[in-house]
Amino acid sequence: MTTPTSAKPPGRPMDVHREAALLDAALELLSEVGYERLTLTAVCERAKASTKTMYRRWANKDELMAAALRRAALRVVDQSADVTATGSLRGDLLHNLASAGEPHVQPSAKYISGLLVAASDDSGVGRMAKELVRLHHARMAETVLGWARERGEVGEDADPVLLADLTRAATLHQILVGDGQVDAAFVERLVDRVLLPVLTSRQSGGAR
């Protein structure tokens, strides 16, 4: 982690489009090179901005990345509003998890590794990285279990946090340790062999 530096006196406010370009460049480079190899110079080059422009807004790498991860978290929240209903818990899980694994949505291994590295630090960037990791699958889990309760497929005690945690853990393992492909076959195995048995065990009398 970079050592925090003293905040500089605020200068002229940065143009909102320039700020967005720098934050997006930081997120792109996080996906390409990971957190530790990401440099402020590379971010500025990618955004076609000067380092002077960047330092008017953020004093160091940690401040920039905390802002970039906050931007990514807001995107995750926006995307999670698009959870699709299919009429069954299995269908909802298969459809929405498969959609999350599409190439234009699935995060890269370096992006995930970078998040985990950042999350290990007790700082602003560390807190934002933890929150971003937590947000993945959280809203989907709450939504699909709400629908499943209404249909009587699961009990009131079906836990969306457990569903999100299991899904996140399996997905992170697949991206970082497995073959990296969160494809339809992986999603079907996860849903049928892990998620549905856990979520419906009380309904079938399997849990005590």
Image (cartoon, rainbow, N blue to C red):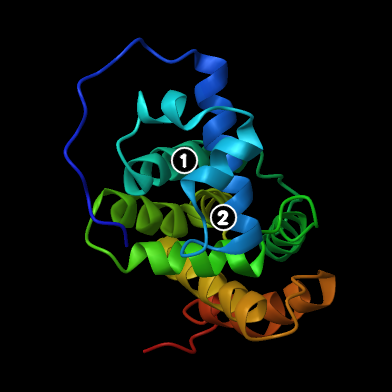
Give the residue type at disc 1.
Answer: Ala
Which disc, if any, is residue 30? 2
Instruction: Tell me the CA gap for discs 1 and 2.
Output: 10 Å
As rendered, which of 119 and 82 lies closer to the eye?
Answer: 119
Residue 176 appears in the picture as rendered: yes
Left or right: 73 in relation to 124: right
Which disc, if any, is residue 99? none
Q: Residues within 10 Å of mark 1 (few under 14, many from 20)?
A: many
Is there a contact, CB below 8 Å, between mark 1 and mark 2? Answer: yes
Residue 154 appears in the picture as rendered: no
Residue for point 70% across, 56% down: 100
The answer to whether residue 106 is above or below residue 208 is: above
Image quarter in which the N terminus is found: bottom left
Question: Residue tagged by mark 1?
Answer: 68
- In the rendering, at what x and y percent does residue 59 appear? 30, 36
- In the rendering, at what x and y percent does residue 151 appear? 61, 54
For numbered disc 2, what is the local secondary structure? helix
Give the residue type at disc 2.
Answer: Leu
Residue for point 56% across, 52% down: 140
The answer to whether residue 10 is above or below residue 123 is: above
For numbered disc 1, what is the local secondary structure? helix
Left or right: 167 in relation to 83: left
Q: Residues within 10 Å of mark 2 (few under 14, many from 20)?
A: many
Residue for point 52% across, 70% down: 113
- In the rendering, at what x and y percent does residue 173 appear? 59, 81
Q: Quadrant of residue 14?
A: top left
Q: Earlier in the sequence, mark 1 or mark 2?
A: 2
